[in-house]
Image (cartoon, rainbow, N blue to C red):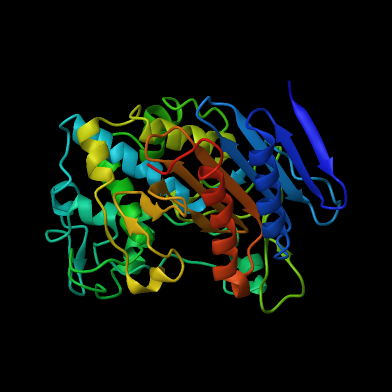
Amino acid sequence: MLVAALVAGSGVTVEAHAGGPTDGNRLRRDVAAVHALGLPGVQARLVGPDGRDVVATAGVADLRTGRPVPPNGRARIASTGKAFIATVVLQLVGEGRMGLDDPVEKWLPGLIRGNGNDGRAITVRHLLQHTSGLHDDVPDFATAADYYAHRYDTYTPADLLGRTLRHPPDFAPGTRWRYSNIGYIVAEMVIDRVTGRPWHEEVRRRVLTKAGMRDTTWPGNDPTLPNPHARGYHEFDDAPGMTDVTEQVIVDGGAAFVSTTADVNRFFRALLGGRLVKPAQLAEMTRTVPLGPEFEELLPGARYGLGLFERPLPCGGTYWSHPGGGSGYTSDNGVTRDGRRSVAVSVSGTRPALFLQHQHTVDRVVENGLCGSGSGGN
């Protein structure tokens, strides 16, 4: 039976489908700490080994009306979608239709050339591992005025790759690690070529449907979100307070997925539980390399596989995750190595001045949930 409790004076609601009071109390406190950073709305969902969950929300879904954060609300999950794309690629590898060490040139002949960029030297593994060296030049909003002027702009993957090719590579492929949105955009183009179908249709068929993610959608160039949802806000230097940035086209297709905390949990549990890729390919996904120095402060102790971060747990062992951020929403998540305990968090608000503090506070929601009663990191 669903139990709902409003904690007096905290603005935090807990809906407990499962888990003991310890799990619910800890989740409530951790969610309240995220909201206390001045972020409008927070939702977190912990799923235990028995598959039942605890949900906590804080703040409001709409700063104008004050309506509460819906516990089943949809939100943009940004780069969490990279894990979906990597999963499709690894499925295709497991089917023998492509190889991780195939040069990109094999699938996209002549497409990556110029300014020292060369698709013959970049492999599919490099794309998924953030070691391709391709320079990121995906458009973003620097100011509120920029948002209002360009929120409906659209780009094709070829347009975005063209922006990248105006720059020399950041480094030779395979020699360093640097987070790369364009690498995953190129991976989407490879999926198109290998399957003869749009990459997002392959994600829907191979990942969303298989994992039972009924509330996860890819919007294409639709700038709106399906209901129910919290509105997304961003703090720009040229505007007072928080700017409502809910309505916009997400130009990086892999970062455009809209999902729920329930569905994000379903995905990571299915993936690490061995239900989406074969054991050999899951082993490839979880074979990690060190991050670049620019990420060490953001995600201390983390390493990267193929579409997955491996992160240390304070209670011992590690967990698997792929956070995402931007466009007024951030997504954080984690699942234990055995796929039995997971946490997903959605925050409707971004404040660049609090970037590190935001990430570390949300990480505590995930880590404390995974280290909860009866859990272990391994």
- Residue at left 21%, top 57%? 111
Question: Can you say whether 79 is above or below 218 in the image?
Answer: below
- Residue at left 33%, top 61%? 161
Q: Taking 254 as reference, is 94 left or right? A: left
| Of 248 and 121, the residue lying toward us | 121
Most distant residue in the top direction: 1
Q: Is residue 219 visible?
A: no
The location of residue 163, given as percent across then percent down, is 36, 68
Q: Taking 310 as reference, is 327 left or right? A: right
| Of 41 and 326, the residue lying toward us | 41
Please identify the quadrant where the N terminus is shown.
top right
The location of residue 135, given as percent across then percent down, is 31, 70
The location of residue 332, given as percent across then percent down, is 53, 51
Question: Can you say whether 3 is above or below 378 in the image?
Answer: above
Please identify the quadrant where the C terminus is shown.
top left
Q: Is residue 271 visible?
A: yes
The quadrant in which residue 96 appears is top left
